[in-house]
Image (cartoon, helix red, strand yellow):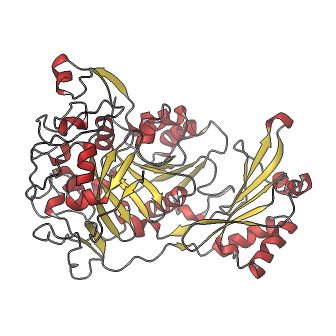
Amino acid sequence: MPLFHEVSQGQAPRVLQQQISAPPAPRFASNTATEIRRLLDALPSPVRAALVDLEQHGGRSTETLVELNVQIGRHPEAIYADRTGSHVRVSLCPGQCTRSDIDLFQPLFMEHAVSSYKRVGIPSTLHRLSLTTHPCRGDAVIAVTMRVGRAMHGVVSRMAPFLTPNIPLPVPAPAPRGGGGGQPFPPPPPPFPLMFAPSPSFGSSSAFTAMGAALCGGGAAGALPPGLSHSDVLSKSLLLIGRPGVGKTTLLRELASTLSSDMRLSVVVVDKTCEIAGDGESPHPAIGSARWMPVGLAGRQASILREAVENQTPDIIICDEISTSEEVEAVRSISQRGVRLIATVHGTTLPELVNDGERRNLVGGQSNVTLTDAAAQQRADKRKSVAVRLREPAFEQAIELHERDRWVWHPNMREAVDGYYSGEPVKVFVLEPGRVLAAFALPTEDRFEYCLECGRLGRLCAAHALTHGAAPAPAPEGAYGAGGGGAGRPNRRGGGGGGRAGMGGQRGGVCHGCGLPGHHRFECPNGD
């Protein structure tokens, strides 16, 4: 099944925010070419000659070089990025690598200390070499992988300008009357660089409407709950979720640089593998004026995180690759001390963390509870034992990086996690270059799927009304009727049955916000 369900043919997605002009593509830092030359100079001469030959005769520029892999018994390969951002593997030579080829890299290992993560960095750059060893042969090195590191500017302003305090914010444009076709409202006059065009059909949840308006710093007088503003979004801890190579660390670097430019903030970067700010004695300029605390040794990130809180008086801590139970507990402890966290984890969608025994405590943990007989009777499956979130999540919001030009923002971590446990659809934002789109997160067995058609309609589309238990019949603008009797699908969190009761949920067809039957939480007319 696809992760994203696009809008119906001939329709346009509902745009909640759009920049007047297309944002420029992210650009490399000015010293990138110098650092690539420094990398080539550090490589063994046969490897360097093969890369230069590819550039001169094979049309493969070192500016697009991503990775180099040399392994005994395999053809040496260089990996390049094409114009679309996809990776292409290119053989450096016809022969297979031998022990003598691996030994060519030995001077680099001798000159720079190899960390317990089996990595060595080239000082004053973001490049690194990783070793693969054979545990049954005395940890002999059998492969070397070189990763080219580059600092980039413009990623945040292109994809999520609301994350930085230095991006000017607009006055929201008035909402168009009627449902519309999802097209943006005409932009306000200069000097405001953005526009905000909410649609009445995508705003029955007051909290969700408020978060949408918070993207642009406010809304019409009296339209938002009190106390919610752009500063609220900036004050929340943020978890970045994505697979390796999608750009999480690049985003961390730019956030560190941008946030540390505010002289009122103390920003500390805890660098687990010296990938964020390099492997030299001084941090790479890509993190701006943020303080840098390298970890380098396996198993030490948890203690360095605690040290950062106790010794550096930070406002914001930025760290990479939260993976072990010790690191999870350190992050949970920090979240309770008034320090904002920005961290990354490997994954695709938020539910993968919920289902991970080591990392689920980042998003609130899990507990099994026993319902009363009366509560169990309200459920379609009559189950009395159900799973629920145990505590407050360590992070208040999350962004999933699916592609370099498509992210999903969960502005309310608690609501997203509860929605997954209950099987309830949750409203989310899909971030694309220069615009923010409305979508629904639809819980499945082990992940979220995202429907832009549901976001366009402001309710479940006909296809997902059948699988998630809502009535597909049209409803008046902003109004929702009682659930239909369509066949719902069981799910491992206890859902099943037909109609709204078939959503499963911890209450089986009862709104999780107000406790009344006949509607989902995102439709609740009584607010959250």
Q: Residue furthest right?
A: 100
In the image, what residue occupies the spot 31% across and 34% down? 490
Could one spot residue 496 in this view of the protein?
yes
- In-image side of 192 versus 112 (left or right): left
In the image, what residue occupies the spot 92% across and 55% down? 100
| x and y percentages locating residue 427 in the rendered image | 27, 51
| x and y percentages locating residue 247 in the rendered image | 53, 59
Could one spot residue 512 in this view of the protein?
no
| x and y percentages locating residue 22 in the rendered image | 38, 78
**Front residue of this view, candidates 488 and 309:** 488
- In-image side of 455 versus 89 (left or right): left
**Front residue of this view, candidates 476 and 37:** 476
**Front residue of this view, candidates 410 and 470:** 470
- In-image side of 42 versus 440 (left or right): right
In the image, what residue occupies the spot 23% across and 39% down? 487
- In-image side of 273 versus 235 (left or right): right
Relative height, residue 389 to residue 193 (above, below): above
Relative height, residue 144 to residue 490 (above, below): below
| x and y percentages locating residue 104 in the rendered image | 88, 58
Q: Residue furthest top?
A: 373
Relative height, residue 180 to residue 366 (above, below): below
Question: How many numbered circles are shown?
Answer: 0
Quadrant for the C terminus, please.
top left
Q: Quadrant of residue 439?
A: bottom left
